[in-house]
Image (cartoon, grey):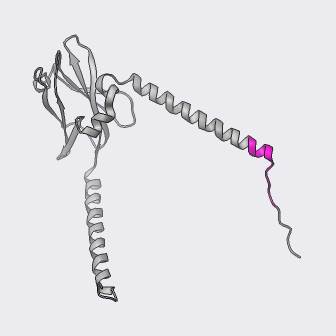
Amino acid sequence: AAAPTATVEKTDAELDKMSVEEEVETLVRKAEARRKRQEQEKSVSGNLYLDSQAQELSGTGLNYKIIDGEIELEWATKSESGTKGFIVKRRPAKTEEFSVIASYADWGPLQSKGVDGGIYRYLDSTASPGGWVYRISECDSAGVESDLCQCLVEVQTEEEQRGAVIAAAGIVAFGIIAVVAGLTLDPLGGV
């Protein structure tokens, strides 16, 4: 004897209830995203707040290089009206609190280069492996700080760096083998 088959059908009322619940979930997620954005806006000021995406796309924001485990930060200004200097801040990724790691008050090269602006560099030799967010703030003659630019830097351990090199070499070797195999096994000889 054949076993009876059970079918589960949802009523129109149950389907309406599910779609209402999904809609409420969507609204809650959007409200949470809006709240997070507003919190982020509270912690940012100056040009970074006004046009951070344009800075990133134009390359005029904060650039970095990792040299022997140290992080070189570089940024440029086109003009500096009333600027005393710059403050370099850092925080671990996925956290909120920045710490000042260098200031124009302590380190001469961070003082303003004058009304025409200039290129600035700072070498951070204290960063350990992990993700770091760096922020540059401009300080004017009245002592008001304005956030200028920021970037995320991922510092890898030596093992991670070695693993990345090995993976890249493996991918290149696989590509070469695939091309050679394709040429060797091609029955038409490339015709």
Q: Quadrant of the N terminus?
A: bottom right
Q: Quadrant of the C terminus?
A: bottom left
Taking the spot 28% from the left edge, 48% from the top edge, the residue there is: 156
Q: Which residues are magenta?
A: 7-16
Q: In the drawing, does residue 16 fall left or right of residue 158?
A: right
Taking the spot 27% from the left edge, 71% from the top edge, the residue there is: 173
Taking the spot 17% from the left edge, 18% from the top edge, the residue there is: 83
Query: Does the magenta run of residues contain 51?
Result: no
Residue 53 in the image, given as x and y percentages of width and height: 33, 35
Label total for image:
0
Q: Is residue 48 above or below residue 142?
A: below
**In the image, farthest residue toward the top:** 142
Q: In the drawing, does residue 47 fall left or right of residue 40?
A: left
**In the image, farthest residue toward the right:** 1
Query: Does the magenta run of residues contain 10?
Result: yes
- Judging depth in this view, the residue of 114 and 121 nearest the camera is 114
- Judging depth in this view, the residue of 106 and 87 nearest the camera is 87
Q: In the drawing, does residue 174 fall left or right of residue 96?
A: left
Q: Is residue 82 above or below residue 148?
A: above
Residue 63 in the image, given as x and y percentages of width and height: 22, 39
Q: Quadrant of residue 28?
A: top right
**In the image, farthest residue toward the front:** 191
Q: Quadrant of residue 100?
A: top left
Q: Is residue 97 above or below residue 71?
A: above
Taking the spot 27% from the left edge, 50% from the top edge, the residue there is: 157
Residue 131 in the image, given as x and y percentages of width and height: 32, 41
Q: Quadrant of residue 190?
A: bottom left
Residue 94 in the image, given as x and y percentages of width and height: 40, 36
